[in-house]
Amino acid sequence: MSFALPQTRPPHALLIEPIVRHALEEDIGRAGDITSDLTVPADKRIEAVLVARKAGRICGLIAAERAFRLINPELDVRAEIPDGGDASAGASVAVIQGSARAVLTAERVALNFVGHLSGVASATRALVEAVAHTKARIVCTRKTTPGLRVLEKYAVRCGGGFNHRFGLDDAVLIKDNHLVAAGGIKAAIDRVRAASGHMLKVEVEVDNLDQLAEALSLGVDTVLLDNMPPDTLRRAVELNAGRAVLEASGNVTLATVAAIAETGVDYISSGAITHSAPNLDVALDF
């Protein structure tokens, strides 16, 4: 049974399991689930359903399935709406069959993953739909929950967005504080080029059109246009004339994103889709 649609590109199981295992260890503690162990007969078997209380884009079943099966490998977990699919309010997302104790022990951790990651996917989908009439792509940032980056970035993909850097080692992104410490755009780029290979992409953050012109003259791959209003972004696109990839960032909300996209930028990055997305209400019913 597949827990994810093919286009979502789920993380490898080797990356998911340590995250889920840590969450279970945190919840189970030293003595295990004493409530379930003391109240539920050991041989009691049940069927439980993960239900979306509100409509949204589903994500996190790959983590929920791992939580259930780490507690009891014999649990049968069947996706009804896989990661990357859309659920209406009241829809059955997954069905779990097997030991009642095991299901109860894994329940909270499984729901935490599905609720949070579905919230990220749903928030991403909303921005993606708002800019669908443009060429702009929605991308995430490194503003992720510590320890959950690989799953939150997966949730962004489930929402139809794209991933920015996974970490500091993916590419060079020279931001404002780097420029101050390095002594300016040219000094920073000269140092990068003197010490890096041809495969390394270089992005520079700029605050105004003068900085953009300097960055373009130095042949950077991507320019991050930070907190520029739409009229300035439009002028930046004209000045760029297709030379570099342009990424707009700052003040990206559902109310502003369409206007930003209509300026002609290539990418729009949002930290809010990972750090401020509300949980999707998902419950487990016996």
Image (tube, rainbow, N blue to C red):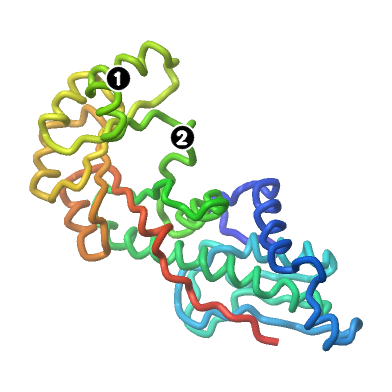
Residue 251 place in picture, x, y as percent: 23, 55
Q: Is residue 13 or residue 42 the one in the foreground? A: 42
Q: Which mark is residue 168?
A: 2
Q: Is residue 269 or residue 132 the one in the foreground? A: 269
Disc 1 is placed on an element classified as helix
Question: Disc 1 marks which residue?
Answer: 189
Disc 2 is placed on an element classified as loop
Q: At 67% across and 61% down in the image, what residue appears?
A: 23
Q: Few, some or many C-alpha atoms within 10 Å of disc 1 (few <14, some 14-19, many ≥20)?
A: many
Residue 268 place in picture, x, y as percent: 29, 48
Identify the mark nearer the N-term, 2 or 1: 2
Query: Viewed as shown, does residue 95 lie left or right of 252?
Result: right
Which amino acid type is marked by label 1?
Ile
Q: Few, some or many C-alpha atoms within 10 Å of disc 2 (few <14, some 14-19, many ≥20)?
A: few
Q: Is residue 173 or residue 88 the one in the foreground? A: 173
Query: Viewed as shown, does residue 120 lie left or right of 239?
Result: right
Estimate the spatial distance between the alpha carbons at disc 2 and disc 1, rounded to whole Å: 16 Å
Can residue 186 be seen by looking at this rendering?
yes
Which amino acid type is marked by label 2?
Leu
Q: In the rendered view, would you say 144 is above or below 44?
A: above
Quadrant of the frame with the N terminus: bottom right
Q: In the rendered view, would you say 222 is above or below 24?
A: above
Can residue 7 be seen by looking at this rendering?
no
Give the mark count.
2
In the rendered image, the residue lying farthest to the top is 194
Q: At 50% across and 75% down in the image, what residue appears?
A: 87
Q: Which quarter of the picture shows residue 181?
A: top left
Residue 17 place in picture, x, y as percent: 70, 53
Q: At 35% across and 32% down in the image, what residue appears?
A: 173
Q: In the rendered view, would you say 218 is above or below 234?
A: above
Q: At 30% across and 19% down in the image, what residue appears?
A: 189
